[in-house]
Amino acid sequence: MREPVGLFDTPPHQGEIRLATLIVCIQVALFLAVLPWQSIPLREIPAFIPMVDTAICVGELIIATKLYAQAAIFRSRALTILASGYAFGALLLIPHALTFPGAFAANGLLGAGVNTTVWLIMFNGLGLPIAVILFALRKSPELAQPAEERPSEPVFEALAGTIVLAVLATILTTLGHDSLPPLFVDDRVGIFASIAIVSSVIALLTFAATALLFRQRNSVLDLWLLVAMSNSVIQQVLGIFVHSRFTVGWYAQWGLGLASSFIVAIALIADTNRLYARLAVWSVARKREREHRMMSMDAVAAALSHEVGQPLAAASLSASAGLTYLTRDQPDDARAIQAFRDCQNGVSSAFDMLKSIRATFAGGLGSMSEFQLNDLVRETTSLMAAELTAHKISLQLALDEEQPAILGNRVQIQRVLINLLTNAIESLDTVGRRGRRIAIRSTMPDSETLLLEISDTGAGVAPEKMADIFDPFVTTKSTGTGLGLSLSNTIAEEHGGRLWASHSDDGGATFHLQLRRIPVLQH
């Protein structure tokens, strides 16, 4: 199963879903509040359109840039289409501001007719829902195929095509505005029937795009596109009733458009930053794992060279001496036999060395030292602080400072702590509820025993798997190997302690690590 790494394949958390739902509810409430008063005329503000067009244009260009970047990285035609839809809408806002009557000139800078600006905004409204429909239809087949097997996506060619379409739409609405059906009779008053028909067509397309997204809402991008499409539906329905400029309804339409653009842009920026933070943590962890692996390989090579090299060299010398005794003019059989026995002993010693080295690197207690378990907990949580922050997890420590030092292998006990904390983080990633936290508590049940409890508010462990989660190759994760908890349990037992799990009061899991001050070593 491929790890989600992009906005288009990362599922949203429950908090994001609740926030998006709240935003849509607020938009609907504003629509219902404005509708009875939509025809009330307000003061004409000539600078309003240039300011709003500029703000929306910047927001949609930010969205398009991020989508184009993801399309290039993941070779996605669906993302390219969606980015082009946002870029098309942003580019049309430039001639819309320039041609709007009264903004820069009485009849607009381009000298077009009264219907130019309204047709530009209608084309603007058509671009995004069509792009979203094509995105939704194209996305599912792409997700079923790995990105590396798809051809590179011509992002720059798509952007060039989008610019050409925007220029053609501008030419049609300016030089060819007389060939388009009239929507306004003058600078302020529109033709209700014509505007209602065009707005209804755009609303139907937007509703179709919303329905397609709702059917396959499985990513962060789908969620925020649904917010944008819901906003567009409200705008177009409101546009059916609004047939005059500078009214309550007209200002509300533009306000909704501005809010939609910035909500989606901010949401995508925030989610992109969160994904990049997660990737950075993964990259650091992978680099650290690779360095540890290389250090282990160097240690194995050095041990083999030093420990195994000596008996093999002695065996080689003994074999050479034995051959010398046998190939003399007067062979010395007794010495030859002894030399070959020494060779056999050297080879046997080399095999014993190999077994010893394998045991050392496969498990074994190794060097023992005295250390404070609480200090090791603080050191380990400090090492994982960046990962906890990236996953938005709070950490609670309740450590008994009266605990004495224990005797054990500090590195191996730290590996147990890292494994338990990593499992807790991965469990919390499967749930989206609030209160994402990990609690670590240390106590002393008696004078010779130390107990460490690591609890989380994650998904917990299924009751049917609780009894055998410490068995090798048993895992509760789709990508797990089933060796982490098994190795941790072995280390605990080798230190004369034990490791077990239980269900926590918050619905997650609690792992209990019990150690003895002076371990009863297990062999």
Image (cartoon, rainbow, N blue to C red):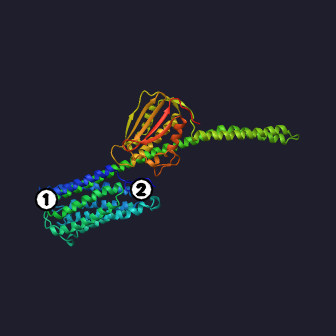
Tell me if residue 450 comes above or below residue 434 in the rendering: above
Label placed on residue 73? 2
Q: Nearer the viewer, residue 50 or 422?
A: 422
Q: Nearer the viewer, residue 263 or 117?
A: 263
Q: Residue furthest bottom?
A: 179
> Which amino acid is tagged 1?
Pro
Exactly how many numbered labels are in the figure?
Answer: 2
Measured Cα–Cα span from mark 2 to mark 1: 48 Å
Label placed on residue 296? none
In this rendering, would 69 be left or right of 48?
Answer: right
For disc 2, the neighbor class at 10 Å (few under 14, some 14 to 19, many from 20) is: some
> Which amino acid is tagged 2?
Ile
For disc 1, the neighbor class at 10 Å (few under 14, some 14 to 19, many from 20) is: few
Residue 309, given in percent of the width and then of the height, sits at 68, 39
| Res. 376 in view | no
Q: Which residue is mark 1?
A: 36
Residue 420, given in percent of the width and then of the height, sits at 45, 41
Q: Nearer the viewer, residue 288 or 96?
A: 288
| Res. 105 in view | yes
In this rendering, would 108 be left or right of 324?
Answer: left
Q: Residue furthest right?
A: 330
Secondary structure at badge 2 equals helix
Q: Earlier in the sequence, mark 2 or mark 1?
A: 1
Disc number lying in front (2 or 1): 1
Secondary structure at badge 1 equals helix
Residue at the location (24% across, 58% down)? 231
Residue 22, given in percent of the width and then of the height, sits at 25, 52
Q: Quadrant of the C terminus?
A: top right
Residue 62, given in percent of the width and then of the height, sits at 31, 54
